[in-house]
Amino acid sequence: MTTTAPSVLVAGGGIGGIAAALGLARQGFAVTVLEQAAALGEIGAGIQLGPNAFHALDQLGVGAAALEGAVYIDKLVLMDGISGERVVELPVDAPFRRRFGNPYAVTHRADLHRCLLDACRENPRVWLLTRQKVVRHERNGAGVRVFTEAGQVFDADALVGADGINSRIREQVVGDGPPRVSGHIAYRAVLPIEQMPEELRWNAATLWAGPKWHLVHYPLRGWKLFNIVCTFHGERTTQGAGEKGSRDEVLARFQELCAKPRAILDSLTEWRYWVLCDRDPVAYWSDGPVTLLGDAAHPMLQYFAQGACQAMEDAVCLSHLAAAHRGDFAAAFQAYQRQRVVHTARVQISARLIGDYIYHPSGVGRQVRNAVFGAKTPEQLYDGLQWIYGGSGLPGGAGAAVG
Ligand SMILES: Cc1cc2nc3c(=O)[nH]c(=O)nc-3n(C[C@H](O)[C@H](O)[C@H](O)COP(=O)(O)OP(=O)(O)OC[C@H]3O[C@@H](n4cnc5c(N)ncnc54)[C@H](O)[C@@H]3O)c2cc1C
């Protein structure tokens, strides 16, 4: 197929890459996604999406579709995992939705990815290629040339590296070496609703916090499943994603967890684990017609539940600015970087702080957490979250147009 529209290559077909492809195609660009895997898809686990994710999905034209499969929870609950006391609740019901203009919802990753993918498949300006592992790129006149492991070569006017935390594109643009291995381990599983203890079938994203560990649960897929994530400070020094986990390790690490939520762990036998990695924020990630997005640009610990939300905001920002600069990608990518670096760096840093001071403190730090958050009103909590839940990736917040 031939096209006269400016062309963009997107390396990586995760949530960020597919969102970027959709955003760019909706702005009139011809987009080719190069994904290393044999098939496009996501892992079988849940994901929390703040209102900012839905603002971004609205901008991408798939907000309603994304909400179809999602569960609208009523609250986010922080429990003291040792004493079992409720520390604080953040209501995310009707007043929250009115305040932020969209819900806080939980969904299945595969459902979210599929709704972005379906919209790409319906768009004649998107080409989706699998088994295409990008290994390097070089400048080609005003454009860019990309080389794959299998020896194929792709030329385009611009390149977006959405190839995740170990990005090959980042290696050449930023060159800051491998990610930081935090050693924190997240064990994930999904539990059929019948196996979830009845007294914990809450319509909430619930987090049981303990010293250097926490457990999260929330309902998924029309209440057929519960998503379970157990995170603790481990000793592993190498990366790992989706490895088969050991039930004994989880039970040993969560011995101090109070009885009610411990019953969840007793009934689970199948676990997969991820070794959590991030990077220190950087001030630049664009080089001429090449830029980065999502985890390739600003990988973060999961503790703010914002990695994918920020990747989708990036996609909105990038595609609007590419259109506003009429395909002058070098200028557009500098503007995108100016717009996104401080915001996403703040999320990266906040994610680390949330882990240290809210989810994992012990001793007097735990008491401080319980006292400070126990005293907060919903309005105070909402005010503290405006900077993140009010965003969509567009300058000026959710509804603003790019100037
Ligand atoms: C335990 C856990 C819980 C989380 N919970 C949440 C949450 O609740 N809410 C939230 O918003 N975020 C959450 N996150 C973060 C979120 O999962 C990520 O930030 C998000 O998926 C990043 O998307 P991405 O598209 O940038 O990168 P990825 O999802 O890493 O996608 C990168 C894609 O690029 C492909 N690729 C890699 N290298 C190459 C190459 N060389 N050539 C071609 N293709 C390549 C990969 O196969 C993959 O498809 C969580 C993360 C973890 C670990």
Image (spheres, grey):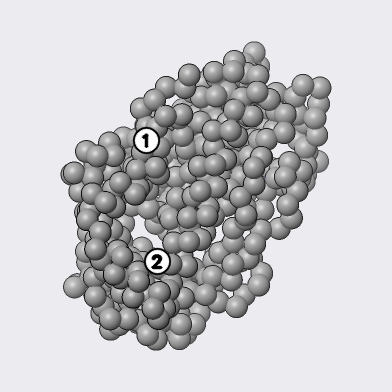
Picture quarter with the N terminus: top right
Amino acid carrying mark 2 in the image: Ile
Q: Disc 2 on helix, strand or loop?
A: helix
Packing grade of label 1 (10 A; few <14, some 14-19, many >=20) is: many
Q: Position of residue 45 (x, y in %)?
A: 42, 58
The residue that disc 1 covers is: 55
Instruction: Confirm or reject: label 2 Cβ below 8 Å from ligand 1.
Output: no
Q: Position of residue 191 (x, y in %)?
A: 34, 68
Is residue 61 something that shows in the picture? no
Q: Which residue sits at x=55%, y=77%?
A: 234
- On the image, which quarter does residue 199 sit in? bottom left
Give the number of the disc on residue 358: 2
Is residue 142 something that shows in the picture? yes
Disc nearest the viewer among 1 and 2: 2
> Contact, CB < 8 Å: mark 1 with mark 2?
no
Q: Residue furthest top?
A: 4
Q: Position of residue 154 (x, y in %)?
A: 74, 31
Q: Is residue 383 left or right of residue 158?
A: left
Q: Nearer the viewer, residue 248 or 352?
A: 352
Q: CA distance from mark 1 to mark 2?
A: 27 Å
Q: Which residue sits at x=73%, y=41%?
A: 173
- On the image, which quarter does residue 17 sit in? top right
Q: Disc 1 on helix, strand or loop?
A: helix
Q: Which residue sits at x=18%, y=44%?
A: 94
